[in-house]
């Protein structure tokens, strides 16, 4: 997660946003099975952005982005993103695209934790008036079930390799869920932006988002994840609603 802090971050090497990310999701370690295609719609709306915005309504983006993932077997999947948003006063605009190969640790390794590695890369702009940059993320994924409890940690790293904001950032994420009768999961998700590997930001300039979420598992071949994130610092978007709807298509 990232945010624009125009008043006091312009000299820092961390690129930031005034509206929600195109994709707000904590990954689990299992990948898409062979010959299965998974299509997701990521919808995120910022009700209130960071403190100090000259035009508060400028943060009220409705991000609508698509993710297409196909499983190839051999513990490998490939994803493709189309990022876009309804921009206040300017309608829907295309924001860029990424590809995302992901590998998971085979069950035969008998690791005590679920583990996989996702790498995204492509071009993107985070606001309507900006130029595209080449960017992406490196996302290790670790998770574990303990009875009805599920825990996932993504020690994520975002990077930008073109433009004026080249960096390798520290953006950790985690998720805790309690599952009720294997049908509904309720819990919390967290998203942070701590700075870069060259410069950790002071606490009030970091972004920390935390909020309740719900997963629905009972509808066959469908994914439903939703939550409401609250910003914990003045440089965090204050209120963000997120919704992920997905459907699996199997090759006959």
Image (spheres, rainbow, N blue to C red):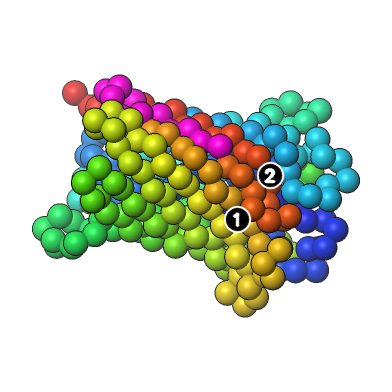
Which residue is at the far left? 108
* Residue drawn at point x = 51 percent, y = 47 percent: 98
Q: What residue does disc 2 label?
A: 238
How would you rate the neighbour count of disc 1 (Cα within 10 Å): few for under 14, some for 14-19, many for 20 or more?
many
Quarter where residue 248 is shown: top left
Task: Give SS at disc 1.
Answer: strand
For residue 5, side relative to residue 143 (left or right) = right
* Residue drawn at point x = 70 percent, y = 34 percent: 47
Residue placed most toward the observer, 76 or 44: 44
Residue placed most toward the observer, 109 or 216: 216
- Relative to 30, does residue 38 appear above or below in the rendering? above
* Residue drawn at point x = 62 percent, y = 38 percent: 240
- Relative to 16, does residue 13 appear above or below in the rendering? below
Residue 196: percent from left, percent from top:
61, 70
How would you rate the neighbour count of disc 2 (Cα within 10 Å): few for under 14, some for 14-19, many for 20 or more?
many
For residue 207, side relative to residue 111 (left or right) = right
For residue 166, side relative to residue 71 (left or right) = right
Residue 89: percent from left, percent from top:
81, 28
Q: What residue does disc 1 label?
A: 208
| Label ID, residue 28 | none
Residue 119 in view here: no
Residue 252 in view here: yes
For residue 246, side relative to residue 233 (left or right) = left
Q: Does 123 lie within the magenta span?
A: no
Residues in magenta? 216-228
Quarter where residue 241 is shown: top right
Q: Does 220 lie within the magenta span?
A: yes
* Residue drawn at point x = 69 percent, y = 29 percent: 86
Task: Report the quarter where the C terminus lies.
Answer: top left
């Amino acid at each position: 997660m990232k945010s624009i802090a125009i008043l006091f971050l312009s000299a820092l090497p961390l690129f930031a946003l005034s509206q929600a990310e195109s994709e707000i999701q904590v990954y689990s370690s299992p990948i898409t099975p062979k010959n299965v295609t998974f299509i997701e719609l990521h919808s995120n709306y910022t009700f209130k952005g960071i403190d100090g915005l000259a035009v508060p309504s400028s943060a009220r983006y409705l991000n609508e982005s698509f993710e297409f993932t196909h499983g190839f077997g051999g513990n490998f999947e490939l994803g493709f993103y189309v990022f876009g948003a309804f921009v206040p006063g300017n309608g829907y605009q295309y924001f860029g695209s990424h590809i995302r190969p992901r590998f998971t640790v085979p069950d035969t390794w008998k690791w005590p934790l679920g583990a996989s590695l996702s790498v995204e890369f492509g071009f993107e702009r985070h606001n309507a008036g900006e130029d595209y940059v080449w960017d992406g993320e490196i996302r290790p994924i670790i998770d574990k079930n303990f009875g009805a409890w599920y825990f996932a940690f993504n020690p994520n790293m975002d990077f930008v390799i073109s433009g004026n904001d080249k960096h390798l950032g520290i953006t950790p994420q985690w998720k805790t869920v309690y599952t009720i009768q294997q049908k509904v999961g309720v819990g919390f998700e967290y998203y942070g932006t701590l700075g870069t590997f060259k410069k950790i930001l002071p606490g009030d300039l970091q972004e920390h988002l935390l909020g309740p979420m719900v997963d629905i598992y009972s509808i066959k071949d469908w994914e439903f994840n939703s939550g409401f994130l609250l910003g914990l610092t003045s440089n965090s978007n204050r209120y963000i609603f997120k919704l992920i709807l997905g459907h699996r298509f199997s090759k006959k």
